Image (spheres, rainbow, N blue to C red):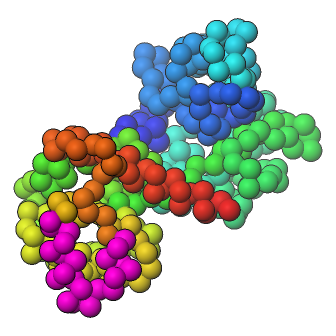
Amino acid sequence: MEDWLSIAADHASAVLVTVAIVEGSVPREPGAKMLVDAGRQWGTVGGGHLELRGAQAARAMLASGETRRLERFPLGPSLGQCCGGVVHLAFELVDRDHLAALAARRDRDSWRLVSLDAAPDGAAALALLDAEGRVVHGSAAVPAFDRTLGTQVLRDQAGRRWLADLVAAPRAHLMLFGAGHVGAAIVRAFADLPCRVTWVDERDDLFPATLPDNVTVEATDTPETLAQSAPAGTSFLVMTHSHALDQRLAETILKRPGHDWFGLIGSSTKRSQFERRLRERGVGQERLDAMVCPIGVPGIAGKLPAVIAVAVAAQLLTVWEAALVNERI
C-alpha cells in the first residue's frame, strides 16, 4: 500500500487534501485524504471532477505559496457528479515535522489540529493530540472540541477555523501463517485495506524483497508462540505447507481465551479430520463450530490463489466492519 503518511514524509513540496465536512450524498467520508505534488497524486477524496478540481486547487497553492485553505464543492450544480451532495476540502502545505510526529504514532489514535485561517503572529497553526486530547507535538494553544464526532471543522473563541482530523490506528490485525502462493496473493489483496498484517513462515527465503507498508514479516520456527501471544481481537488465517503444522496452529488458536476469528484453508474433508483430532485434544465444540473452513465468501468456488484471496478479503471485511459497528455502539 502506498501510504499517504510515508509518501508525505518524502515530499516537502506537496499539499495534503482532507475531506473536512460532508453534506448529503458524497463519495468519501470525513478524514479521507489525497496527497498532491506538482505532477502526481496519491490517495483519493472521491474521484471524478471533485478530485480533478481538488488537485488543481492544491497545485495552485504550491505555485502561489499559500499554506492553507478550506473550499466548498457542490457536487451536483458545479461539478456534474450525480451523488449531488457537498464536500468541503481542507488543503494544507505538508509540514514534515508534524507528519513525522504522526508517523511515530501509527499504532495509536491521534488527532491533528490544523489552523485553516491566517494565524496572528506567534500563534500556533499545528498540533498533534493523543486520543485523550493531550498535546503530544506542537503548541498547546488549540481549541476544545468533541472527539466523538470524528474529523470536523470548528472555530475557536476568536472565530479562527480549525481542522480537527482524526487519524485512527488500524483496528483490524490479521496474522497470516504461510508464505506460499495463496498467502502471497492474500498479502497483495490486503495491501490497500485498512488493516495490519503479520505474515508468518519459517522459510525466510519465500518472503518478497518488497512488502506493502501494512505488512510485517515474522520468520520463525515456532509460529505457535506468535499465535499464543497475539493481542486479543487478532484475526488468524492458517495455510502453511504442512497439515501437521496447520493442526498445531489450529489447536493453539482455538485454545486462546476469547472468540477471535480463525480461518483454515482446506476442504470440508480437511475440516472433518481436524475437528475430530482437535476434539481429542480438548478443543470445545463451540470453538470448533466457530472455525471457518473452507474459507472465503460463499458462491466463489475458484481455486486460483488470487480468487481465494479476493473471497477471503471480502469475508474478513464483513467481520471487521461488524466489529467496528459494535465498537461504536
Q: Residue 225's image quarter? A: bottom left
- Residue visible at 53% across and 44% down in the picture: 99
Quarter holding the N terminus is top left
Position of 248 compared to 284: left or right? left
Q: In this view, does 316 lie above or below 114?
A: below
Q: Can residue 182 be seen in this view?
A: yes
Q: In this view, does 300 lie above or below 259?
A: above
**Which residue: 85% across, 36% down?**
160
Residue 46's x, y, as percent? 55, 25
Front-lying residue, 183 or 160: 183
Nearest to the observer: residue 104 or residue 267: 267
Q: Quick check: is 3 in the magenta stretch?
A: no
Judge left or right: residue 48 versus residue 200. right
On the question of residue 216 being in view, the answer is no
- Residue at 32% x, 70% y is 291
Horizontal side of residue 223 vs 64, given as left or right: left
Where is residue 133? Give x, y as percent: 71, 60
Tally the marks: 0
Query: Magenta includes 282?
Result: yes
The answer to whether residue 63 is left or right of residue 163 is: left
Quadrant in the rendering for residue 155: top right
Q: Which residue is drawn at 56% across and 53% down?
A: 168
Which of these two is toward me, 131 or 269?
269
Q: Quick one: quadrant of the C terminus?
A: bottom right
Provide the residue span drawn in magenta. Answer: 269-290
Residue 170: x %, y % from top left = 48, 55
